[in-house]
Image (cartoon, helix red, strand yellow):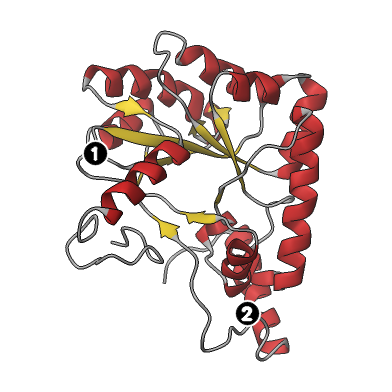
Amino acid sequence: MPHLSRRDFLKLGGATLLSTAFSGFNLQSADFTPPPIVYHGNRDQHYIALTFDDCWHPEVLEQLNEMVAPYPDFHFTFFAVGDALQINEVKDPGVWRRLVSRGHEIGYHTMHHYDPATMSSNSMMNDFDQWMDTLHQVLGFEPNVRFAKPPYDDISPSFETLCNQRNLVLTMYSIGYEGDTVQDGLNAAAQTQNGDIAQMHTYEDPNKGRLDASISAQVIPYLASQGFGLVTMSKLYDDLLLQQNSSDGCDVGTGESLTRTCVE
């Protein structure tokens, strides 16, 4: 039997209890159209989308911004938790405006990092609206948010409904660069393919095996040396739509439908 951490146990137990207590909770109608879900981009394009989840620790955000200074065309997508938007702004005023002005993109990752499976569709939409209000406050303007990533990779019916109602592209990933050592991250980066969506976080604590900043400092120049570009999710997804609209799909068997994009 696999080992479950206390957080995993509570997460699974809570979701199970809720699903038992609310039979039919968040069930979708038979004619429900799934939102777009993207796992990777165009495999013919020699670039990737490097994304960062949660987005705590403003000092790491600043370091990431500095890491791409030698590469003016490199941009990230930050899937920020609403609490991190607020707290980072207090710790480092203007940090989010600086990231956006540099060309980086911000996506939705819930207000408090709750599991979407424990939230109703109405709760999800209220959560997104609160998150948008928070983003508006820290930026000073209301940006166009196009992409949403669920905590715990949980594509729940409520999260799908939110994406449909708020016209968001549900975003997953095809590779991750995290590990217990910097070499783990470099080994993972060596497996990068064209069009990958790479997942990372923004934690840096060697005592806990979290080395996102250290790994990024090595992975970014490595990817550059291999000729990869780093693009926002908007660039990756728009190019993907252009390809799908002018061909039979980005992979064999996907056809022309955009409702499920590059599912592997």
Please tell me which residue is depicted at 24% across the width and 59% down the height of the picture. 249
- Residue 119, percent from left and from top: 71, 69
Q: Nearer the viewer, residue 211 or 35?
A: 35
- Does dot 1 land on a helix, a strand or a loop? loop
Dot 1 or dot 2, earlier in sequence: 2
Mark linked to residue 235: none
- Residue 20, percent from left and from top: 67, 88
In the image, 263: left or right of 68?
left
Q: Nearer the viewer, residue 142 or 161?
A: 142
Please tell me which residue is depicted at 52% across the width and 89% down the height of the picture. 30
Q: Is residue 179 visible?
A: no
For the residue marked with disc 1, what is the amino acid?
Asn
Which residue is farthest left? 252
Q: Nearer the viewer, residue 188 or 142?
A: 142
- Does dot 2 land on a helix, a strand or a loop? helix
Q: Give residue 262's quadrant in the image.
A: bottom left
Question: Would you call the spot at circle 2 few (<14 residues within 10 Å), some (14-19), or many (20 or more)?
Answer: few
CA gap between label 1 and label 2 equals 38 Å
Question: Which label lies toward us, 1 or 2?
Answer: 1
Q: Nearer the viewer, residue 128 or 92?
A: 128
Residue where numbered disc 1 is placed = 194
Mark linked to residue 16: 2
Compared to residue 250, the image places residue 77 above or below, namely above
For the residue marked with disc 2, what is the amino acid?
Thr
Question: Would you call the spot at circle 1 few (<14 residues within 10 Å), some (14-19), or many (20 or more)?
Answer: some
Please tell me which residue is depicted at 29% across the width and 32% down the height of the picture. 47
Compared to residue 185, the image places residue 145 above or below, namely below
- Residue 138, percent from left and from top: 78, 30
